[in-house]
Amino acid sequence: MTTRRGIARFLPGVVALAHYDRAWLRPDLVAGVSVAAVAVPIAIAYAQLAGVPPEYGLYASILPLVAYALFGTSRQLILAPDAATCAIIAAVVTPLAGGVQDRYLALTMTLSIITGVVCIASGLARLGFLTTFLSRPILSGYLNGIAISIICGQLGKLFGFALTPAGSFRQVAEFVSKLDQTHAATLAVGLGVFVGLRVLKRVAPKFPAPILAVVAGIVLSQVLRLGDRGVALLGAIPAGLPGLRAPDLDPRDLEPLAYGALGLALISFNSAMVTARGFAARNHYEIDANQEFIALGVADIGAGLLQGFAVSGADSRTAVNDSVGGKSQLVGLVVAGLLVVTLLFLTGPLAALPITVLAAVLIHSAIGLFDFASLARLRRINPREFNLSIVTLLGVITVGVLPGVGVAVGLALIHLVASTSHPHDAVLGRAADGDYRDLSRDPDARPVPGLVIFRFDSRLLFVNADHFKARVRAVVADAGHGVRGLVLDATAIASMDSTGAAALGELCAELADRGVLLVIAEAHAPLRDMLERTGLHERIGNEHLFRTVADAVARHEAVTA
């Protein structure tokens, strides 16, 4: 029984496959073939983005798919190379590798394994709540910045010349200065493929356009002999599967790789969870965020041991899976099997693929990361969060992809502190139906003579304790000299720390000196516990702790009658 519970807890995919509905087999097989048709060209393209040879994108896709099918809780999510994670990998590894390819590959493997360990530890520590740490506006700004960085980095390959890896602004400046070096045939092929991808997305959004782009590129290359015309080709891809091995590690690299792994784990987990939760909601089931952390960690370790790199939730491939009717984690196993077949038997034709085609696929995919509609809506409904999103975007394209993680985390913390330090509050009045409502919003509500009813819509913590005292002083002063009591409506004060308790005690004494009695209504159990532990319940008086605001008002009116 204990073994079964352990399997159910840590291997939910095994349980799901053990109770597999055979009616799902056909849609799962169709979905697997469809996802593989998209996954092969995108994996090769994203390998270029991560800075490794093309076959390593396929290596990075196999074991993560198997691991997630066993450890994951989403029925639709596909783990695979992802634009944001590949951009971060390149940003972390490039400065450390010194241009040595073997060292670069070892570092990407090590980074993937360390990231996996961080994810597993986070899942076991039940840190799945970090999926909400980066708010949607900040995550959107980060992904928009990644999209711009990818596009800027691929423009040179699209036009047929090299660009120095640098910030987006410098790459654009270098791109403009080298426009006279444009290779016409390279640009014609790349631009034609890009236009075709955009048209297919509009007229047939469910069609696996990247595989068509790759096939078209290979055919054009062989028919027109593009290699002889100076168009750069992908070159030979080794056939066969890589062996499992641990990477060579220089202990001096551990610290920078660990920092990179923390950022990579945070971004890849948040990105995967946005995708997983979206499709889980669409298909009416729940996912376990802590288990998802563990599943992502096992997948990253598997990718690293198979000489690949860290992965994340792939929204485009997950969307393909869902759109063609994928029902279970079996889809991931089918895709992994087809990737193995590709590596064993289908690498030969890929040698003729023009690199400009991969650039077109990457730019097309990067455009899919943009979410202008959400930005426009955010600007309309919450200008402050819109500004946070834009600042995050600018951080990514100015200071770089990896420092952009720090910008995103810093802005998330600033936003959290700012929203907590100055929460909403309200002065309440009595309405005709006897309810107590915000005087500034309900014209029918009227103040209770001699009484201020104040609601503070947040926990009372060190970050807002001074603001709380200032607001109480202000509302009491605004009420005039006839005030004899203040009712603190504690409905929204779910808890209080020691600083908040000290502020409440100081306020109680200050109001008493002014002849104003402080009473508390609707305090929840955690707040009452804190009042008892700090002795505030004695200073305020147990008789001044009321179950409801109405009870507190009735007591005031009885005393003052």
Image (cartoon, rainbow, N blue to C red):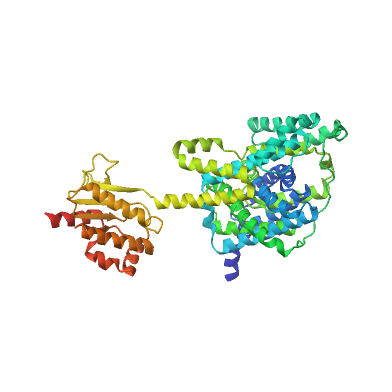
Toward the left, the furthest residue is 561
Direction from residue 490 to residue 35 in the image, left or right: right
Which residue is painted at 22% across and 45% down in the image? Answer: 433
* Residue 141 placement: quadrant: top right
Which residue is painted at 14% across and 57% down in the image? Answer: 559
* Residue 529 placement: quadrant: bottom left
Which residue is painted at 31% across and 47% down in the image? Answer: 426
Please state, as top left, top right, bottom left or bottom right, where the N terminus lies in the image.
bottom right
Asked whether residue 435 appears in the rendered view, the answer is no
310 and 96: which one is in front? 96
272 and 114: which one is in front? 114
Q: Give coordinates of residue 547: x percent, y percent.
A: 26, 59
Q: Give coordinates of residue 485: x percent, y percent.
A: 21, 55
Q: How many labels does the image show?
A: 0
Direction from residue 504 to residue 254 in the image, left or right: right
Please state, as top left, top right, bottom left or bottom right, where the C terminus lies in the image.
bottom left
Q: Give coordinates of residue 486: x percent, y percent.
A: 23, 54
Q: Give coordinates of residue 356: x percent, y percent.
A: 76, 36
479 and 560: which one is in front? 479
Q: Is residue 220 above or below residue 168?
A: above
Direction from residue 281 to residue 211 in the image, left or right: right
Asked whether residue 405 appears in the rendered view, the answer is yes
